[in-house]
Image: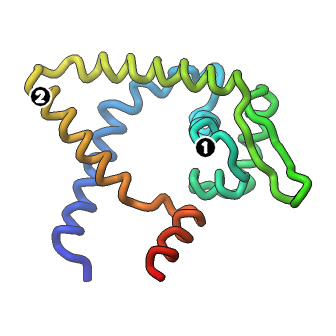
Amino acid sequence: MLEPIAQEMGREMLRFHRLYGEKISRRFRQLHIDRLSQTEYLLLAIIVERKHLPMSELCERAMMRKQQVTQNVNQLENKNLVLRVRTSENRRVVWLEPTEQAYEIAREVQQALVGELSRIFGQLKDDSLEESLQAMRTINRILERFPSGTAEEKEEKEEKEV
């Protein structure tokens, strides 16, 4: 049986997710929708962050099926945002790399998102804003401790346990 505090944490996380979607996320869903779908942007953001990663890792990090990722990567490739690279050592493994245009779009979208979020949070009073900032920093530190479920992180955890 789960600890009561872990259960309460689960309930609060669901509440956070609902409130975030209702009060914040849906306000900027339309940003850059003309250029990228939300899924394409999610995948592009992962590729830009990692700079060079195999397709299998992208699937794991995005928690999506290979077929879904392949369709969206095809769209990103058609938009000249992603390059598929095969190495001579193993031609079966497809590596993905962002183009310069991908970095530019990622910067533009991030600036637009930060601007919209700043506008939203700017509605709070100074003391509430400071409290919210501290809470967000705490939440981010906690979330960074959780593994994303990638094979790489599983291997690191197993190595530490040995």
Callout 1 secondary element: helix
Task: Locate residue 22, reporting x and y percent.
Answer: 33, 35
User: Residue 21 at what x, y percent from top left?
Assistant: 36, 38
Q: In this view, which residue lies farthest toward the left?
A: 127
Residue kind at label 1, given as amino acid type: Arg
> Do the numbered discs 2 and 1 sit on residues whose CB atoms are within 8 Å?
no
- Of 159 and 109, nearer the camera is 159
Q: Residues within 10 Å of mark 1 (few under 14, many from 20)?
A: some
Query: Is 28 in front, or is 137?
Result: 137
Graded by Cα atoms within 10 Å as few (under 14), some (14 to 19) or many (20 or more), the crowding at tag 2 reads few
Horizontally, is 89 left or right of 135 in the view? right
Residue depicted at 25% across the width and 39% down the height:
136
* Mark 2 or mark 1, whichever is nearer to me: 1
| Quarter of the N terminus within the rendering | bottom left
Residue at x-position 59% and y-position 34%? 41
User: Would residue 104 appear left or right of 97 to someone viewing this image?
Assistant: left
Using the image, tell me which numbered label, if any, was put on residue 128. 2
Residue 89 disc label: none
* Picture residue at 61% right of the left edge, 22% below the top: 105
In terms of secondary structure, where does tag 2 sit? helix
At 59% from the left edge and 23% from the top edge, which residue is drawn? 33
Quarter holding residue 134: top left
Q: Residue 146: name its quadrant.
A: bottom left
Closer to the camera, 3 or 37? 3
Which of disc 1 and disc 2 is earlier in sequence? 1
Q: Which residue is mark 1?
A: 50
Q: CA distance from mark 2 to mark 1?
A: 35 Å
- Give x and y (percent) for residue 18: 32, 45
Residue 115 in which image quadrant: top left
Q: Which of these two is toward me, 40 or 110?
A: 110
